Image (cartoon, rainbow, N blue to C red):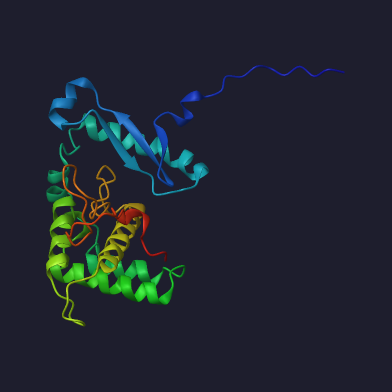
Amino acid sequence: MQLEVEPFDMDLRLTKGLFKRGKGYAVRVAVPTEYQLILGKKEIVRGLGTQDLAEALVLHKEAIAKIVSSISEGDVTPTVGETNKRRPAKQGATISETAHRWLAGADGIKNATKARYRQHLETLEVYTGNVEVTQINRELALRFMEHLKRTPSERTGELLSARSLQSYQCCLASYWRVLDHWGLVDPDVRNPFSSLLRRVAGQKKKDVLGRETLLEIDPDKVCVAA
C-alpha cells in the first residue's frame, strides 16, 4: 500500500540574513535607501555570539527584528567612531577585567603562554589607562605597537625582539576575538590587532623592528601556539 504524502511549503526565509563569519554566525540586514545617507552604511551586521548552527537559527530572527526596529526608530549609529562614544560599555568591560576573565577561564592555554599573555595585556592596560574595550580601535592598536618597538624591556634593557612583538600581536588579536565572541565590541569593526606588523605597500622588505632584510616575515603565520 502506497502512502500519499501531502505537499508542504518549506520556509526558505528561515535562514535569510544568516551567514557564517569566522567560526561563528552573524546576521546581515540591508539598510533601506532612504536611511543610507543618514546611517552612513548600506547594511548592518551583528554577531550572534554562537558557533552552533541550531542556536543561530533560533537567535537570528530576533536579532534581525531588533535591527529593523532600530533602523525605523533612527537608533542605529552611523559610524564606528560615534558608536564608541555613544554606546555605553557593559559593566566591567575594561581591559583589566575582561583580560582577567579570559585568562582565568582559558584552560586550553599552557601556563607559560598564559603568563606571557597576562603580561602583554597588563602592558596594554597601563598604556591605555585601562580604558573600556569599546574604545579600542585600529589607531590605538598601531600606536601601542609603535610604543612597544621604541620601549626597552625592563628585564634586559634592550628593545623587544621580533619574536616578542609577534607574541604581543598574537595575544591581542586573540583577545579581541574573545571580546567579539562575548558581544562586548562592535561586530562591524575589523580586528584592530590583526596584521599590525605587516609591511605596508610600497615599503622595502624589513623585519618587524624596521631593519631591511631579505626575508619577509609574515607575523600572522608565526604566532606562538597556545
In this view, 30 is above or below 102: above
Residue at 42 percent across and 64 percent down: it is 225
Name the residue at 23% across, 31% down.
71
Direction from residue 70 to residue 108 in the image, left or right: right
Measuring from the top left, give residue 18's x and y in whole percent: 42, 34
The residue furthest front is 214
- Residue at 16% in and 32% down: 39
Q: Is residue 179 visible?
A: no
Residue 47 falls in image quadrant:
top left
Whether residue 125 is visible: yes
Residue 62 placement: quadrant:
top left
Between 181 and 145, the residue placed more toward the observer is 145
x then y, percent, for residue 183: 32, 52
The total of numbered circles placed on residues is 0
**Position of residue 119 measured from the top left corner of the image (x, y, whole percent):** 27, 74
Q: Is residue 73 left or right of residue 172?
A: left
- Residue 225 horizontal side relative to residue 179, left or right: right
Image-based side of 54 in relation to 88, left or right: right
The quarter holding residue 5 reads top right
Depth check: give the residue in front, 190 or 3: 190
Residue depicted at x 31% and y 70%: 117
| Rendered position, 104 above or below 93 | below
Q: Quadrant of the N terminus?
A: top right
The image quadrant where one finds the C terminus is: bottom left
Seen as rendered, the residue at the extreme right is 1
Residue 110: x and y in percent read 44, 73
